[in-house]
Amino acid sequence: MLVERRASLILLVATVLAAWGWIFSKEAIQGMPPFGFIGLRFILASLCILPFCFGKLKVVNRGDLTRAAGVGCVLACAILFWIFAMSVSTSLGEGAFIMSLSMLIVPPVAWLLYKQAPPRIFWFSMPIAVVGLALLSLGGVGWQLSPSQIWFLLAALFLAVHFNLNNRYAQRIPTLVLTCVQLFSTGVVATIASLLTETWPDTIPPTVWGWFTLSVLVATSLRYLMQTLGQKGASAANAAIIMILEPVWTVILSVVWYHESMPAHKIAGCALILLSLLVYRGTQPLRDFMRKKSR
């Protein structure tokens, strides 16, 4: 029980760091190309972790390392879609809630990958999320997904694939090694994408480098380490519930930091998405809690 609580607290801190990562990233890409920003950020983050796992890295099975790098490539797709969506989005909070749908995409992906049928509660929670997404897409000309919403959805899809793969390999590969390899492979993929599609500015303001540094040390190295460590010690259900909090913190920060407006229909859409996630991930832990109370 103590291990579970400690892991839950670690995941809670990870959600706060992840929310701040949205702010750090949005500020950094004001002066850096998005894909290049991700490439440098993730490669440097992996190098920060490397000294702490170099010994274990040398003894891990090479096949496991290759598979970990492959999982990192899936994460790279998710992150690249995410940063591009952020670069064209005017609402970080809305994007955060769309990204949180990845938790609801996890069950059908597991169904495809591992033949694990979604639980019955999934079919109750998914329609709620769809209605919430529809409300987020409601604008002055009716219902229409904006380009940023589509890119956020693609990012959520790849993040769901990564979540499934990462949960499997987190049980076999040491936490630091898995984190380091995934961050490095993500950075390499993003750097290649940047070299093929972007042009760097002649000069980058010092303030942008400051946001970049925070992104590397706080929102990447520390955040992904704590998330992987938390996932390893917490049950899948509890981990998923806690990770739901990330968009909540992001909305709060975006409203405070950028003074983003949240019309009533968007607030309702975010609330329905949050409700769908709570219904899906909160039902079983609540039943377990009530069962323990009744004993």
Image: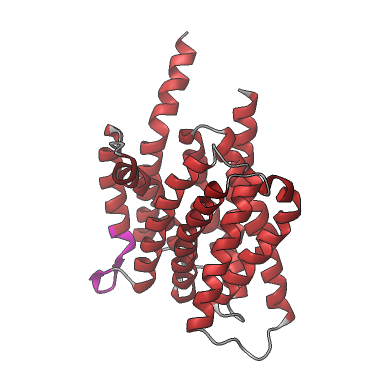
Magenta highlight on residue 142? yes
- Nearest to the observer: residue 106 or residue 164: 164
Residue at the farthest bottom position: 202
Residue 265, percent from left and from top: 34, 59
Residue visible at 30% across and 34% down in the picture:
121
Residue at the farthest top position: 295
Residue 109, percent from left and from top: 33, 47
Query: Measured along the vertical axis of the image, is residue 51 above or below residue 279?
Result: below
Residue 88, by quadrant, is: bottom left
Way the structure is coloured: secondary structure
Query: Measured along the vertical axis of the image, is residue 12 above or below residue 222?
Result: above
Residue visible at 52% across and 41% down in the picture:
242
Magenta highlight on residue 99? no
Decide if residue 293 is on the left or right side of residue 53. left
Identify the magenta region: 134-144
Residue visible at 66% across and 47% down in the picture:
176
Residue 175, by quadrant, is: top right
Residue 122, percent from left and from top: 30, 38
Query: Measured along the vertical axis of the image, is residue 265 above or below residue 227?
Result: below
